[in-house]
Amino acid sequence: MSFLFCKFDMDRRNFLQMLSGVAAMPLVGSTHAESAALRIGLTPVFLDDQLDFLKQLNAYFARQSGRPVSFTQRGSYREINELVRGGKLDFAWICGYPYVRYRREMRLVAVPVYHGKPLYQSYLIVPKNDRSTRTFTDLRGKTYAYSDPDSNSGFLYPQYSLLRAGENPTTFFSRTFFTWAHRKVVEAVGVGLAQGGSVDGYVYDTLALAHPELTETTRVAHRSPLFGHTPFVARHDIPERDFRSMQEILISMRGSQEGAHLLRALNLDGFTPGSSSLYDGIAAMARTLAESRR
Amino acid sequence: MRFNRLDDLSLRYKIPLRVIALVLVTALCVTASMVFREYDESRRDLVAHAAGLGRVLADTLMAPMVHDDLWRAYEVVRTPQQHNNSDFETLSVASVVVLDTGFRTFVSTQPTRYPLGLNPAHQETDFAYMQQALATGEATAQRLIEPPASDRLYVVTPIIAEGVLLGHLALGYSRQVFAPRLRNLMARSALVTLLVLTVLLPLSTWWARRLADPLVALATAMDQVAERLPDPAVVPIPTTGDEIGRLAQAFRGMLIGLHQKAQLEQHMLVAERLAAVGRLSAGIAHEINNPLGGMLNALNTLHRHGAPDALTEKTVSLLERGLTQIRNTVAALLVEAKVENHPLTPQDIEDIHILVMAAAEKKAADFVWHNRLDAPLPLPSTLVRQVLLNLLLNAVQAIATGGRVECDTRVVSNRLAILVENDGQHISAEHLPYLFEPFTTERSEGNGLGLWVTYQIVQQLQGSVEVDSQPGLTRFVIELPLPGAA
């Protein structure tokens, strides 16, 4: 694996975020979206905190598109979703859950291919020393870590599962909290801050390869059925030329040496155009959850 | 007894040992005070650092606590540990615990040790102590809490939002963290002490030698006193002005005094012996003189009135000659000062010069003559002349051919001083104490009564005789007090 990762940089970034209360840290050199630049939003659906890797990815997109590229990151999925819906971003790599909610306001550009399929799972993880937990209902009255309220794997699926088990998801755990990133769910469970957490299986497996010290204090207690992988979307009024160009860049990534290198860093096989129907399963869960709240 | 053995050590070792002891004691004291200061400072640094950190964290924790954002609160409390710098080990936080107003754990860096929502005071005595301490004092003040018999100390900062107390932030620090710093300090101190000792030890050894050597020399010289008096001029004695110098001076003075005493004793011994011999010989002379006078009278009567035959005549004459010789010898032994004679005139002395000149010329002697008298002196002239004659004839006899004889007579502060010296064969040291005894001459000629008579005369005139005889120079000095002048 070629994860180029500087722990210190990331830690400092987290620290500064905390102390300043700023929810996100703009990337150097891409603070302002130029009129001609491609504005791409990123979310923690992948390991989005590796600045060096993002620089390479940015350069790759810029070279392929022939236009400057600006990446935008925010503290929550919601902020990126809103920016796409408001037309402030041209593209964004988001989660399937917001996608199914705002399908009409976005266009599906491509879907990551992971282990040969455009699919991934949600993991229920517990601390390593917890040997008994098999499913959500084993964690009644415990502290639970969700990643983001707009995450399928990190929130929708566990909530849906509890509903299906006949539990009230809002009162089942004694205490819940959001870490706003899958990686931090792993950390929270690893140190014992939470007795369980929901995490993107793709992110967890990738983390296990890049940073085994984070995952080795945890255990995957339960794996969800397969869901459509986190979609790369465009704003609904994206010019057709830009849409095609971006789709082509993503799909052809595995064909170029540099693209393949970046895909290896992402722990992905490549991108496929995909279809909206991939997310019907998530849509069904979202509906069930929405109905339960009425 | 054990201490005596240490006391018996030579100064050469005692001084360096004492220097080592002094250096060690000094080093120990300095190190102890430094360690104490270092500990104090480290602790103050730590508390100051913890107070600052506590305030920053408490401010930052305000929002997550209000929003009940557990993850953000956790990220806040773990930041100090993520940035622990190994160079400043003492400042590293061992534990951070955020407690709500009910003293339940809101969040901590060790969620498994301090479970969320439970009161840590139920598990750890440190926190039980802390809870008690917080209950008594002002709730909104930052506090340093040191639970007794604990290896940790805590800086507790209140978390306040808009004047409302949300809870407390407890930063726990290990007391053990001071140990490496203090150990390091002690190791450095030991090294410096060792360096100082390596410099001071040879220095103090040299210094001890300097101090001890003169004392050892003095002690050695003193040891000799019992066996044989060392010559004060030869004894190696320090001349410094310090106590050792003073001791040496006193020792030299004592040696000189002892020498004088020994000489005086020697003189007295000789004088007493001579006096005893004098009394004995005077007694014998008297006992002999009475019958001798009778015998000589009888012989005289026989000469004058008898008509002895030739053989008797010859025998009587033989007896008379023998008895006369006995009388002369006894007379010589029995020095009589009562002889009537006139006061000593310069001419009397000059007569002796003429008398001795003949003998001196026979030996081609260099005869130096100083007669410094210019007026008659109230001294019996016959006796003084005999003394002078005896000494000069002895001197002339002692010299080799062409030798030197000197005579000097003068008056020095109411005394007549007669000096006679020659460069002939000196008087041996063994013979010197018996020089003035009768019949003890070393020479073949003479009857050995010359110096005896001289001594007797000087004694009767209450004068003194001094002899100094070394190879090349034999000197007699006689001093006679002038009567009525004292």
Image (cartoon, grey):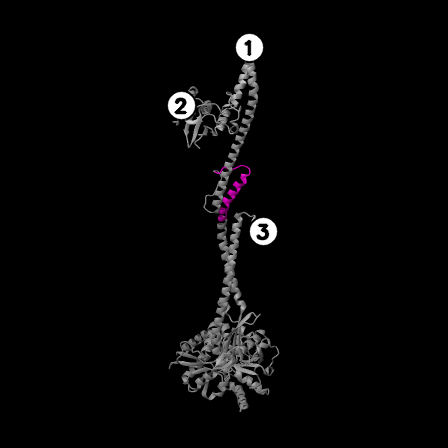
Q: Which labelled disc corresponds to residue B3?
A: 3
Q: Chain of mark 3?
A: B
Label 2 neighbourhood size at 10 Å, few (<14), some (14-19), many (20+)?
some
Where on the picture, by quarter, is residue A61? bottom left
Q: What's the amino acid at mark 3?
A: Phe
Q: Nearer the viewer, residue B321 or B303?
A: B303
Q: What's the amino acid at mark 1?
A: His
Residue extent of the magenta highlight:
B206-232
Q: Chain of mark 1?
A: B
Give the distance between the C-alpha atoms of the residues marked 2 and 3, in whole angstroms: 80 Å
The numbered mark, 2 or 3, whose residue comes first in the sequence reads: 3
Q: Chain of mark 2?
A: B
Q: Which labelled disc corresponds to residue B347?
A: 2
Q: Is residue A234 above or below residue B462?
A: below
The numbered mark, 1 or 3, whose residue comes first in the sequence reads: 3
Secondary element type, mark 3:
helix
Residue B64 in view in this figure: yes
Q: Nearer the viewer, residue B347 or A225?
A: B347
Give the distance between the C-alpha atoms of the residues marked 1 and 2, in whole angstroms: 46 Å
Are the residues at dot 1 and dot 3 in contact (C-beta closer than 8 Å)?
Answer: no
Q: Nearer the viewer, residue A278 or B407?
A: B407
